[in-house]
Amino acid sequence: MSSDVPDWLSAAREQWVNRGVVRPAFAIAPGPDQESVWDFPRPPAIVADRRLVEVFAGVVRLASTSAAMRVLETSHPPSFYLPPESLTVDALVATAGRSHCEWKGQAEYLAVAGSTAPVGWRYPNPYADFADFAGWVSFYPDRVRCAVDGSVASAQAGGFYGGWITPDVVGPFKGEPGSAAW
């Protein structure tokens, strides 16, 4: 892991029990052409995805790319990050609010132009391990329609998380009742 994080954050990272090394007994076994989120690593992996990823707010296409990156983290459905050049010009604006990811850094939120309700987020100045993806955007599938090769993603439970549940991933997923300690 990179050295650009403070000691308190490094210590917090070391507290995680599930790291994708051993799938817990309660995890759903993946079928053919599926992945278990319990096999994803912690710290997360960043993996290129060449499928067509599209995001819509109503009939307005916010983004489209075949050059997305999936962030794969133990217990979470993947978050798809789209490069800035895949975004529809002037479709999104920065909005209020910030949050912190122990792996990526401080996030800022984006809203559809003319609104203040966040539909996505990005890391303008991420930690070194995510630096190549500064400014890349991920979206909440419960706030906009997110699709991977035409398959519409369902939202990760919990209201805060932004994972994309598609038919090729199985859980259970972080955010569901009883998952706070994962």
Image (cartoon, helix red, strand yellow):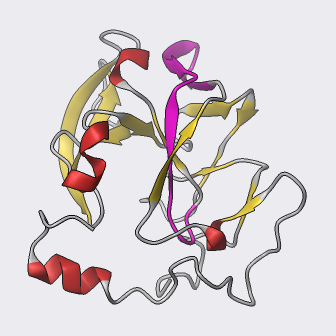
Residue placed at 80% from the left, 56% from the top? 34
The quarter of the picture where residue 75 lies is bottom right
Residue range corresponding to the magenta coloring: 53-76
* Residue 38 in the image: above or below residue 90: below
Residue 4 in the figure: left or right of residue 156: left
Task: Tell me if residue 55 is in the magenta stretch.
Answer: yes
| Residue 37 shown in magenta | no
Res 21 quadrant in image: bottom right
Could you tell me which quadrant the N terminus lies in? bottom left
- Where 141 sits versus 24, above or below? above
Q: Position of residue 80 (x, y in %)?
A: 51, 41
* Whole-percent x, y for residue 47 in the image: 52, 46
The residue sitting at 50% across, 83% down in the picture is 182
Please determine whether, in this image, residue 30 is positioned above or below residue 34.
below
Figure check: 82 above or below 108: above
Residue 128 x, y percent position in the rendering: 20, 53
Side of 33 relative to 12 (left or right): right
The one nearer the camera, 35 or 137, is 35
By secondary structure, the bulk of the magenta-drawn segment is best described as strand
**Most foreground residue, 61 or 28:** 28
In the displayed structure image, the side of residue 31 where residue 57 appears, left or right:
left
Tell me residue 113's x, y (percent): 31, 18
